[in-house]
Image (cartoon, rainbow, N blue to C red):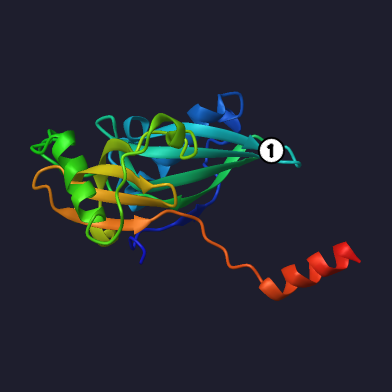
Amino acid sequence: KTTGLPNWISGKMENAVAQRSASVETKSISYLNAVKRPMQIENPAEEFFVKKIITDDLGQQHIRMQQQFQGLPIYGSEIIVHEKDGDIHLVNGQYYPTPQLDEIVPTINLQNANLAAQRDVATFSTFKNLNSEERKYVAGEQFQSELVIYHPKKNIKNPSLAYHITVIPNLTERWEYLIDAKTGDILNKYSSVCKFHADHTSILKSNHNAST
């Protein structure tokens, strides 16, 4: 499902030549200011920040930007601004309109949100308190949490203050939870473990060939 907003906006700005000496960050924000109306963004300078700048083999720069609201990341939002020959000419990606939220103070504390995620995981999996040695294999703590702005089902009219919680219940599973920071309701959950299916026949043939 998409947000319904333009995910591809192209064209050079009228004053592009005059801006060529500016930093790529400044040019990116200027471009977003020029297209903020169709994007439904109120203040690009406050709502987007540069995460990473990549220069390709042709010397073109691609600026990855994260969207935020009052310092909180907007979950699932990332745009890429593209520069060629010193001019910004394209922006693409997923983003959301400036959230219309009166306050961003959670009612549910983080401990209770983590507990809600743990209880839910326990209904379909095995939760084990990992020891220090086991935690080395999962690259972090069993709960990794962040307060975000989340749009359930990518509904641009329904921004919610939520905890994004990564839960590692055991050594083989990893679950992502979005929990409403006002009510404690589970807004979404999904497994983030990368899986692949090996061709056992090919593996057997490779092993046989290697041994002959």
* Identity of the residue drawn at 56% across and 36% down: 16
The answer to whether residue 156 is left or right of residue 132 is: left
Location of the C terminus by quadrant is bottom right
* Identity of the residue drawn at 28% across and 29% down: 71
Residue type at the position of mark 1? Asp
Residue 114 seen anywhere in this rendered image of the structure: yes
Check the image and report above or below for 112 versus 194.
Answer: above
Residue 180 placement (x, y as % from top left): 16, 47
Check the image and report above or below for 125 versus 129.
Answer: below
Label 1 Cα crowd, 10 Å radius (few <14 / some 14-19 / many 20+): few
In this view, the residue in front, 49 or 148, is: 148
Residue 135 placement (x, y as % from top left): 43, 35
Which residue was labeled with disc 1?
85
Residue 154 placement (x, y as % from top left): 29, 59
* Identity of the residue drawn at 75% across and 42% down: 58
In this view, the residue in front, 99 or 51, is: 51
The answer to whether residue 180 is left or right of residue 207 is: left
Location of the N terminus by quadrant is bottom left
The answer to whether residue 150 is left or right of residue 200 is: left
In this view, the residue in front, 17 or 82, is: 82
Residue 82 placement (x, y as % from top left): 58, 43
Residue 30 seen anywhere in this rendered image of the structure: no
